[in-house]
Image (tube, rainbow, N blue to C red):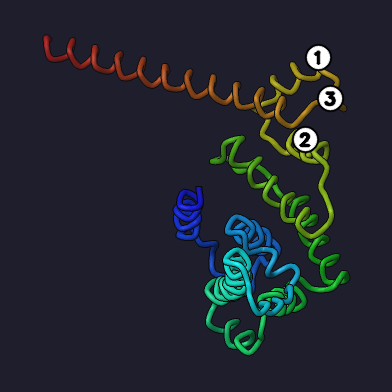
Amino acid sequence: MSLIRHEAEASFSSIAPPVFDGDNYQIWAVRMETYLDALDLWEAVEEDYEIPKLSNNPTMAQIKAHKEKKMNKSKAKACLFAVVSSTIFTRIMSLKSAKEIWDYLKTEYEGDERIRGIQVLNLVRDFELQKMKKTESIKEYSDRLLNIASRVRLLGSSLPESRIVQKILVTIPEKFEATITSLENTKDMSKITLSDMLNALQAQEQRRAMRQEDDVEGALFVKHKENKNYKKK
């Protein structure tokens, strides 16, 4: 079992999180915590535990546990050194433990409550200004809105699903009016889920795309037939 675990960890460790360059700290921190936890190294960052000295006559199990605890602290520190830009590395290279490094990055880049509040306001303002582009699909537009909502959530606030539903309903093009009317006639719009609404809108989008393909194929067929008749003449 230990061999299998070692191979799994070795395989996972090759999928390193992106290098942190000072931007999008909250997203990077979530990825990094998950990554360290999967490698069984998060405890060394979170607790910065002390490693007690071995007794005079330690057992093999005690020696192994002592070595593993010591190694995990070194590994966690090495991981954090490896996933920051060279500029940030120069600021943390003198810190002694993985916890010191983590706490420094959190203090330096997460910002205090006032700064996070300003960031949330900016994101909400950006959310309100969003409109669906002519070249966008429903999925692309909803993904853009959900990305903003996720960034707000990482800052400790939230954009309720009902607000995202309302935003999509009032900003999508007029060509979706038939679907919205159908939803209003069959569902309580104050309780409709984002998933239900997106499924209905995407279904209409697909039907329109199929009709357009049929129209193009029909036009090409007619043109081909006319060319044939012209050549016969």
Which residue is located at x 52 percent, y 74 percent? Answer: 82
Which residue is located at x 41 percent, y 17 percent? Answer: 214
Q: Pointer 1: residues within 10 angstroms few (<14), some, or many (20+)?
A: few
Gap in angstroms between the C-alphas marked 1 and 3: 9 Å
Residue 31 or residue 206, whichever sits in front: 31
Residue 20, numbered circle: none
Residue type indicated by callout 1: Asn
Which residue is located at x 87 percent, y 69 percent? Answer: 113
Q: Secondary structure at mark 3?
A: loop
- Judged left or right of residue 180, residue 10 is left
Residue 13 or residue 136, whichever sits in front: 13
Q: Secondary structure at mark 2?
A: helix
- Closer to us: mark 1 or mark 2? 2
Gap in angstroms between the C-alphas marked 1 and 2: 17 Å
Residue that numbered label 1 is attached to: 185
Total number of numbered discs in the rendering: 3
Residue that numbered label 3 is attached to: 189
Which residue is located at x 66 percent, y 75 percent? Answer: 98
Residue that numbered label 2 is attached to: 165
Does residue 205 sit above or below 146 in this rendering?
above
Pick whichever of labels 3 and 2 is earlier in the sequence. 2
Location of residue 144 in the rendering, given as x and y in whole percent from the top left corner: 64, 47
Quarter holding residue 84: bottom right
Pick whichever of labels 1 and 2 is earlier in the sequence. 2
- Judged left or right of residue 3, residue 184 is right
Location of residue 164 in the rendering, given as x and y in whole percent from the top left corner: 77, 40
Residue type indicated by callout 2: Val
Does residue 137 sit above or below 144 in this rendering?
above
